[in-house]
Amino acid sequence: MTKSEIIDLHTHSTASDGSLTPAELIREAVKTGLYALALTDHDTVNGNLEAAAEAEKHQLTFIPGVEISCDYEKNVLHILGLWIDFNNEKLKRTLSELVDYRTNRNLLITERLNELGVDIAYAEVQAVAGNEVVGRPHFAQVLVDKAAAASFQDAFDRYLARGKPAYIPKKRLTASQGISLIVEAGGLPCLAHPGQYNIDNTADFKAMLTQLISEGLLAVEVYYSGHSPQETAFYRQIANDFNLAISAGSDFHGKAKPDVKLGSGRNSNLNIGMELLKKLQACHSQMQG
C-alpha cells in the first residue's frame, strides 16, 4: 500500500483541543501523503469550513465530521459523525449550546474554588489551556502552580473529582440524542474508540451495541491508535457480527499526543487504505437512500 492510499477518519484541530489549525492539519495530511482525512473536533463543527477549503486546494479527499460526547448509563461515549452537513442549523445550534454551558461551568468551578479560599482567576486557566478547550486538567495545573495542590491527582482528589467541593457536572446529550443529531445532519454515526470505555464484560458491550444500533448507530471505529492487536481483532469480529461498518482513525491531536501520527497512529499500528473508506461511503450512501 502506498502512502497516497492511507486514510485517517479521526483527527482534531485548534477548533477543539488539537495543536494545528484546520488548514495546518490539512497541509500536514498532504505532507504525510494521505488520501483522505476527516476532521472530527470535539462538540464543534467550526473547523470544517477552513479545512474543506484547504483540502480543495490540495486535492485531498476531505470528510467533514464531529465527535460528540454523549451520556450512556454510567459511561461517556464518543460518537463520531462522518460526512456531516456542517451548515446544518440544528447541529450548529445544539453544539453551540453545549459549548456555552461548558464555559459557564468553568466559571462556576472558578467561583467554587474562590469560595474555598483558592485565589484563582479564570483568565489564568485560559492561559494554561492556550488553544485547547478549557477543562478540569487545566484547573488542576493552575492549582499545582499555585501550590494549592501537591499534584494533578491531589487537585482532583481535593477539589475537582466528582463529588468534591469544586465539581460541577457536565451537560451532555444522551447517546440517542447524539446519534439522531448526526443522522439529521446527514452524517454517518460511528462509535469512537470502543476499547477506551470502562466496559470489560463482553455481554454488556454487546447489549450496549444492540441498544445503540436500535437508535441508529451504523459504524464502529475498529482501527484506532489506542487499540492493541487483540482489541482490534475483537472489535472487528464484533462489527462483523453486528453488521456494522468499520472505521479507522488515529485521534491525532498534534502536540497534545506527540506519539500519535496522522494516518499511521501509534507505532505505525494503523496505515489503513482506501478500501475501508469505500465501504464506509457505501454505508453512508445506503443510509441516505
Image: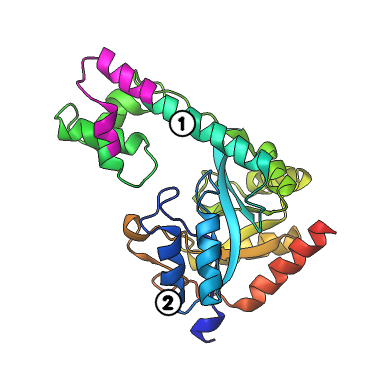
Residue 83: give x, y in percent of width and height: 66, 59
Residue at mark 1: 102
Dot 2 falls on a residue whose secondary structure is helix
Dot 1 falls on a residue whose secondary structure is helix
| Residue stretch rendered in magenta on the structure | 107-126
Direction from residue 85 to residue 265 in the image, left or right:
left
* Residue under the point 50% across and 67% down: 54
Quarter-wise, where is residue 190 in the image? bottom right
Quick one: label 2, few (<14), some, or many (20+) residues within 10 Å?
Answer: some
Query: Could you tell me if residue 252 is visible in this image?
Result: yes
Direction from residue 158 to residue 222 in the image, left or right:
right
Residue at mark 2: 32
Direction from residue 36 to residue 15 in the image, left or right:
left
Q: Amino acid at mark 1?
A: Arg
Sequence-first tag of 2 and 1: 2
Report how far apart the C-alphas of labels 2 and 1 lie in the structure.
34 Å
Quick one: label 1, few (<14), some, or many (20+) residues within 10 Å?
Answer: many
The outermost residue toward the bottom is: 2
Is the C terminus in the top left, top right, bottom left or bottom right quadrant?
A: bottom right
